[in-house]
Image (cartoon, rainbow, N blue to C red):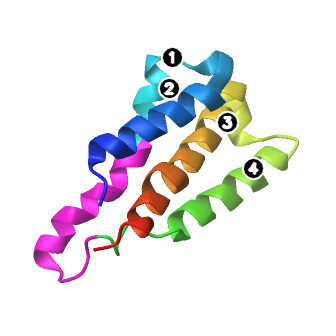
């Protein structure tokens, strides 16, 4: 299982390549939180047998978020675009992409 540092490093590389002009420390902090958040199910594993890598390590949340973002940004009056602008929408897509590829697929490829 890759360490949290490996997840973060790959996410940073993806963010650096995909964010373009929106690449800054704040954007990296957001991507870091998105990529490391699934590790919180480690604490649930203390109380629920098998919760680690099961509770938050799935694509249900990512798929739901992606469909919701796609639906909102395809509307004429997008709440996300109005509130956060193009930077926020791009950061959200990059965060979802990094979450899927820098965390989920790494963990699935290295199951114990």
82 over 92 or under it: above or below:
above
60 over 100 or under it: above or below:
below
**Distance Cα–Cα, label 4 vs label 3:** 10 Å
Can residue 55 be seen here? The reply is yes
Question: Where is residue 12 drawn, in percent x and y?
Answer: 46, 32
Question: Where is residue 110 drawn, in percent x and y?
Answer: 36, 66
Q: Earlier in the sequence, mark 3 or mark 2?
A: 2
Can residue 57 be seen here? The reply is no
The disc at residue 89 is 3
**Distance Cα–Cα, label 1 vs label 3:** 15 Å
**Distance Cα–Cα, label 3 vs label 2:** 12 Å
**Distance Cα–Cα, label 1 vs label 4:** 25 Å
Q: Left or right: 6 with respect to 88? A: left
Q: Nearer the viewer, residue 19 or 92?
A: 19
Give the residue number, with chain letter if any, for mark 4: 72
Residue at the image position 84 percent from the left and 48 percent from the top: 74
SS state under label 4: helix
Crowd tier of the residue under label 3, counting other residues whose Cα lies within 10 Å: few below 14, some 14–19, many 20 or above? some
Q: Left or right: 110 with respect to 88? A: left
Q: Residue furthest left?
A: 46
Give the mark toward the camera: 1 or 4: 1
Q: Earlier in the sequence, mark 1 or mark 4?
A: 1
Give the residue number, with chain letter if any, for mark 1: 24
Overall secondary structure of the magenta section: helix
Give the mark toward the camera: 2 or 4: 2
Crowd tier of the residue under label 1, counting other residues whose Cα lies within 10 Å: few below 14, some 14–19, many 20 or above? few
């Amino acid at each position: 299982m890759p360490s949290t540092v490996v997840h973060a490093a790959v996410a940073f590389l993806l963010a650096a390549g995909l964010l373009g002009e929106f690449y800054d420390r704040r954007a990296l902090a957001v991507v870091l939180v998105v990529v490391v958040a699934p590790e919180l199910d480690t604490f649930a594993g203390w109380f629920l047998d098998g919760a680690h890598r099961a509770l938050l390590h799935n694509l249900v949340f990512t798929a739901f978020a992606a469909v919701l973002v796609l639906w909102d940004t395809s509307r004429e009056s997008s709440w996300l675009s109005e509130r956060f602008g193009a930077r926020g929408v791009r950061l959200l897509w990059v965060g979802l992409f990094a979450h899927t590829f820098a965390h989920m697929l790494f963990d699935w490829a290295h199951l114990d």
